[in-house]
Amino acid sequence: MTAPVFAVVGHVNRGKSSVVSTLSADPSVAVDDTPGTTRAARAYPMRVDDEVLYTLYDTPGFERARHVLAWLRERETGTGERAALVRRFVDEHAGTGEFAPECELLKPILDGAGILYVVDASIPATPAVEAETEILRWTGRPRMALLNPIGERDFSAQWRPILDQYFSLVRVFDAHEADFARRIGLLRSLGELSEDWRPAIDRAIEVLDGDRGFRLRESARVVADALVDLVTHCEEKRLDSDAASDPEKSGLEARYYAQLAERELRLRRDLRRLHLHDDLQVEQAVTDAASVEQLDEDLFDLTTWSQLGLSRSQLAAAGAAAGAVVGAGVDVSVGGSSLLLGTAVGGIAGAASALWGFGQLAQVRVLGLQLGGRLLRIGPMSNRNFPWVILDRALVFHAAVAHRAHARRTPVDLRAAEGVVAALPRDVRGKLESAFEVLRKSPGPDALHAATASLAGEIEAILREREPGRSPPTPR
Amino acid sequence: MFKQGPVDFDWRGLAPYWALVSKDPSLRAPSRIPRVGDLIDLEVALEEDRERPIEVLLARDARIGRELAAAGLDDRGLVLAWVDRVRSSPESPGQAIEALLRLSSLLLVGAGLLSGALAVAGWLWTGARVPVNVVQLWPALVGLQLVLAVFWVLVRLAPGWLTRSVGDGLSTWLPTAFGALAVRFAPPGARDAWNRFRALDRVYAGLRFWRATQLSQAFAVAFNVGALAALFFIPTVDDPAFGWRSRLMDAGELQRVTTVIATPWAAVWPDALPTRDEILATADSSLESAVDAEAGAAGHSEVWAAWWPFLVASFVVYGLLPRLVLRGVAGLRMRRLLGGIDFDHEGCVRLRERLRRPVVDGRAAGEEVTGAHPGSLEPPLAPLELPDRVQVVRWAGVPGTAEQLGERLARVFGVMVDGAETAGGLDLDADAAALAALRDAAAVLVVVEAWEAPSADYLDFLRKLRGGLGERAPVIVLTCDVGVDGQPTDVDPRHLALWRRHLAALADPWLRVEALPADARPRGAS
């Protein structure tokens, strides 16, 4: 299977690096409106484990195409030698500093790369295009033109007839708006350039589809995990006195909201990283913590977890009973081999420790059980809308990052984003609410696992449903 | 002629076949049986992973997955190999729990030996002066063990809600209590790990019960061994006497009971059953005359010899053997449970997916070589006054004819166009001609497409132009734009700024960049 190579070429400032950034899902590619940002050809191999399925080359733009073409025409002896003449041009000028961008961009083409010629469809065509496309035609390599509309205007109609003369394929690809489906569509078109390249491109598409499925599934899982953490989250503080002071309450409250906000930030960070947007900035109307705080005003539960109002003798009896129960367990488990020594020793130890600690209830533990004190607890959030708000925000954020082209460098703007959950089908909402209901009841490990898995499954279905050019869920 | 000596076989030739085998899931090498410590470390690692950034997990597990790919591991083997890789240290929580369990087992064996020996010794020492009442000793040291062992078997095996509930209770809180007690002496990390492990009963159901059973039965086996050791040792240094006294049984009934008890060993050790005469001889009333108060039981070997074999056989058959069986059953059950764990809970499913997924990466490997244009950081050039008469260079691609352009320039800037040249086309001779025509011009307007990036081609031309003009002759680069309908439009300020930044690289004090507005406002009009 031949691993094709594609050189992304064009005039300076036509969005070549943007195309490469989006196709390779690499947000680290330097994208700038300053001409000449890309100084050297750079390879972006699409690797699957240790196998390279295809390679993209980001190249510097043509800067002196007219002069290159003039050089070539001056030395042209016959149509069949044009590619050799282009090679001669590169050989003579490489390393001299003259025509450096042209040498850089032509090298991979002369080494066998297919050509992906990028033009900006939002500006008019200029005569420079003719020189560039002519040079590319001379190389004799398979080539495709991409209309990449960088601005708002659309000169595609003007470009089409020009490009159709030189390129076997012409496609529109907005590098800043292309989602995953469009990226795959462009790859498919690249496979049409040569029969030899199609198997590798088809395999790449298959692998990328699988990888996309994994990232959606993992996204659903991290959202489900975050929902579980957020909905069940509590903050506790042991109190020395019977009543909680205002500073104690406000301190615990601040800690609670900070933890919620931190957890939601971690969810967003995970979603960003899952979709390879490492340093994405986000703009939104209100801070997360503030918006969460609006949901529930009465989160406090001053809980007495063990206030034993017992006399000294009652306490001793209770301690002895607790100790004896544990000791008896030991006796039973050894089949009576211990001759009830466990019961006796446990009872004595329990009674002794209880008596010793009488009057110091808050500090005393009998077999791990603290005998006195009060607990100030905040959470879990009782507002029934809370998980829905979190889920909605997670889905909106996911849509913003999962469908975002990697060439875009502007912050994600969530200020005008519309919610998702209100438009979900009734049965889906019902299943989600069932899972939330389980979470609200402080479930045991089994129920928690089941609810988490159920949430992950439902969320994955939602994410796939909202995927452009969606595919059915992967069987698990 | 046959070659002598060892066969020269190249094992490397088998590599393709092994590769074939390792890719077939049904032919993968069987994985080892996990230990409890592995399970604890697995759960600890999965729990810790919940706090790790997702990209760290993906990268780490992709690396481990690649390293393990060649081993052809099945699902369980893959998870166990992963645990081995990510285990924090040899002192991981799971390893610590394992060590604690081994220590507990040793301590329980020691305690069992000691308590068994002391329990029997306590009874027999009194027998040196007063005969030991076998009717009390046997139920206390042997009978109770038997009853509880039978009870244990019933609650584990017998159907019915009552026994099940008792069994469930035992299997839940008993090991929990054991574990809680044990881990109180463990370091905090191991304690947390144990608590997490407890929370996973759904996954590892029964493991804690059988591990606790292993420990308790180790104690019980040691107890019986200690008891038997005491039974063998004490008669060598003392002369305990055995007898019996009961208000419920007479000698005949006792003989029937002992005969039933001795049934298991009657065929192999018939002497380990007191005869009727021996029972009658060791009855409490008879002992008073048989045992000399001053000489004790010494010299009355027939008195203890009548019961000693019976007691030894009882400890072996009703104490030691059942406990050995229970210990063995617990060991087998543990092994079976551990061997049956297929790691199919959510955390492991996710883990395996991370380990086995193909790692797709389209990013560049090395650092990108970039560089802003040399003049990109320079401030924009200040406006420059135009003279009344100018020469014009129309760059190829600028819309409209030279006449139209001249009219626009006159309207907008109030300048007279003395001559218009064309440059920037495919014909380089036209550039040269334009430069020649502009030599010694008083001022030049170079009209360019604002949307075009100021490439090196423009800079070359402007350098050559300046070379021909000499210093002080103003050169104005005039950017223009058109709409989709072909009509002139205002220049995008971003384009103008870009041109200004870039042409600043020429460091030409007589060079300016301006925009040609779409409308024809006269110079100076608002």
Image (cartoon, coloured by chain):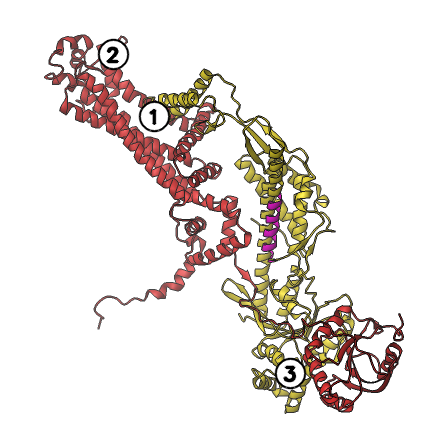
Q: Quadrant of residue A16?
A: bottom right
Mark 3 and mark 2: Cα distance apart in space = 118 Å
Q: Residues within 10 Å of mark 1 (few under 14, many from 20)?
A: many
| Residue sitting nearer the eye, B20 or B522 | B522
Mark 1 and mark 3: Cα distance apart in space = 93 Å
Chain B display color: red
Q: Is residue B264 left or right of residue B430?
A: left
Tell me, yes or no, whether the two marked residues, 2 and 1, touch with CB atoms within 8 Å: no
Mark 2 and mark 1: Cα distance apart in space = 28 Å
- Residue B4, given in percent of the width and then of the height, sits at 21, 69
* Residue at image location 34% in from the left, 27% down from the top: A334
Q: Is residue B35 visible?
A: no
- Residue A208, given in percent of the width and then of the height, sits at 58, 60
Q: Please tell me the numbered disc located at residue A335.
A: 1
Q: Residues within 10 Å of mark 2 (few under 14, many from 20)?
A: few
Does mark 1 fall on the same chain as mark 2?
A: no
Which residue is identified by label 3? A138
Q: Is residue B514 above or below residue B173?
A: below
Principal secondary structure, stretch drawn in magenta: helix
Q: Please tell me the numbered disc located at residue B253.
A: 2
Question: Residue A24 in magenta?
Answer: no
Q: Which residues are magenta?
A: A260-276
